[in-house]
Amino acid sequence: MAERGSFVLEARDLTVVLGGVRALDGLSLTLEPGVRTVVLGPNGAGKSVLLRTLHGLIAPTSGTVSWHRPTRQAMVFQRPVMLRRSALANIRYALAVNGMAEPQRTQVASSALARVGLDPIAYRPARVLSGGEQQRLALARAWALKPEILFLDEPTASLDPGATAEIERVIASIAAEGTRIVMTTHNLGQARRLADEIVFIHAGRAVERTAADRFFDQPASSEALLFLQGELPWK
Amino acid sequence: MFEIFASFGVALGLIGGADPELWAIVLLSLKLSLAAAVAGAAIGLPLGALIAVGRFPGRQALIVVLNALLGLPSVVVGLVVYLLLSRAGPLGNWGILFTPSAIVVAQTVLVVPIVAALARQTTEDAWMEYREQLTSLGVSRLRAVPTVLWDTRFSLLTVVMAGFGRAASEVGAVMVVGGNIDGVTRVMTTAIALETSKGDLPLALGLGIVLIAVVLAINAGAYGIREWSARHHG
């Protein structure tokens, strides 16, 4: 916890070619602690690939992702992947893999569950929970790892409005504790509610990076302007 | 035609009447097949999961070989095990040829490819689903092996039962390495083969009915467990 606040993530000239398609095309981005970043862009712009590459799940074809020091990170996916065991055991598993011993493991897992309001169903098999509950569990599992930076790839894309509001509340409180949030979404209302800054991606490049309150009124790039007009045609 | 019905009647009589000879054979069969299924699972399950999750040179070739081994002619397996276990063979000092242990060895050799090939398929599907999430959590490929095995445990039970079925219905290899010795290595399948050739159809038929019932019960059990797990674990 002591070093919190001091990491720097620097992505330089990232190019990722997947199946012959250039998903990222020379993208550079520096992330430091403090703000909540939402990555916006049209379908296929490379948002998900960017998050996966920063998180280390995809090796860039060229370019580098460098952390100035080892940084605890976690990721929450659009579709939560739960192991065939109880909600609590799913978190305990993640903690065990990361070297936490008992009885601390169960304590931390329980408090993470309580954090997202799932403590009443701690012993329910995780895979029979509703989509919203599973995503909250995924957030609790990520949060239990005490990440300094948390990547979220459209975490509410397949959820109803009630579940979405619940997820947004949890994300905001995780951010409030000092975890760096980097998320993608298709929901512009959500971007407004959660973002301090917007990174707008188009065709595998970061075309602008603007404070959230300015972005929606006065985007700096013509690509973002077109995107917002397409998404919010009444404006 | 009448003879079949008559034999059938006598066979049911043997089963219902707790004929000691019949049940001794049945018990031995189940015991040996269970041992082979357990041994086959102990080797085949981790092997299958390692191939599913691992990335190493020759992986593709190994999958092809494994799938080919599914069609292993059992008499040939019997012959190879016979050569290995025979007095002059490399494992001759074990002294287990023509004992129940030899049967378990041969059955295990037949069960391992089935369990490994089916387990690979099952765990690879799970790995495809889990790979990103587990990697994100910091799980190494080696650490993922027990994870995917445990997570597919209900499906793998069916896999092990398929292995048990293969062991229980095996004739050729069991005949070659066991010798079909009365009261020692005579199991259901070899007894059926022998009694049929001797013309003692009722005993052969009785054993056949028991064998089919056992295989049926096992498959019903496996099906039930899968249904239950799908409802309770998703």
Image (cartoon, rainbow, N blue to C red):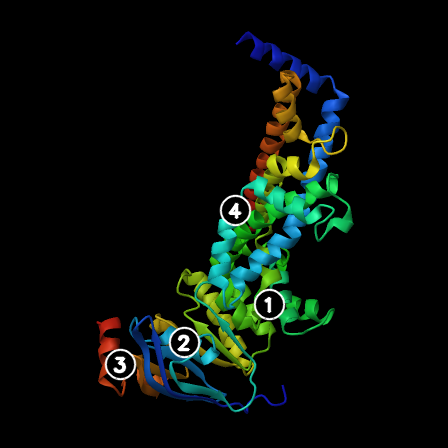
Q: Nearer the viewer, residue B179 or B228?
A: B179
Residue type, numbered disc 3: Ala
- Residue A89 can be seen, yes or no: yes
Q: Which mark is drawn over residue B70?
A: 4
Left or right: A209, with B78 as reference point: left
Residues under labels 4 and 3: Cα distance? 58 Å
Q: Mark 4 or mark 3, which is nearer to you? A: 4
First in residue order: circle 4 vs circle 1? 4
Q: Are marks 4 and 3 on the same chain?
A: no
Residues under labels 2 and 1: Cα distance? 41 Å
Q: Which residue, given by chain and number where applicable, does mark 3 sit on?
A: A224
Q: Mark 2 or mark 1, which is nearer to you? A: 1
Residue type, numbered disc 4: Leu
Q: Which residue, given by chain and number where applicable, does mark 2 sit on?
A: A193
Q: Are marks 4 and 1 on the same chain?
A: yes
First in residue order: circle 3 vs circle 2? 2
For label 3, the crowd category at 10 Å Cα-Cα, with few meaning under 14, some 14 to 19 and many 20 or more, is many
Residues under labels 3 and 2: Cα distance? 18 Å
Give SS at disc 3: helix
Q: Which mark is drawn over residue B27?
A: none
For label 4, the crowd category at 10 Å Cα-Cα, with few meaning under 14, some 14 to 19 and many 20 or more, is some
Chain for disc number 1: B
Q: Which residue, given by chain and number where applicable, does mark 1 sit on?
A: B142
Left or right: B192, with A79 as reference point: right
Q: Residue at 22% of width from left, 75% of height from top? A: A229
User: Is A121 rendered above or below residue A173?
Assistant: above
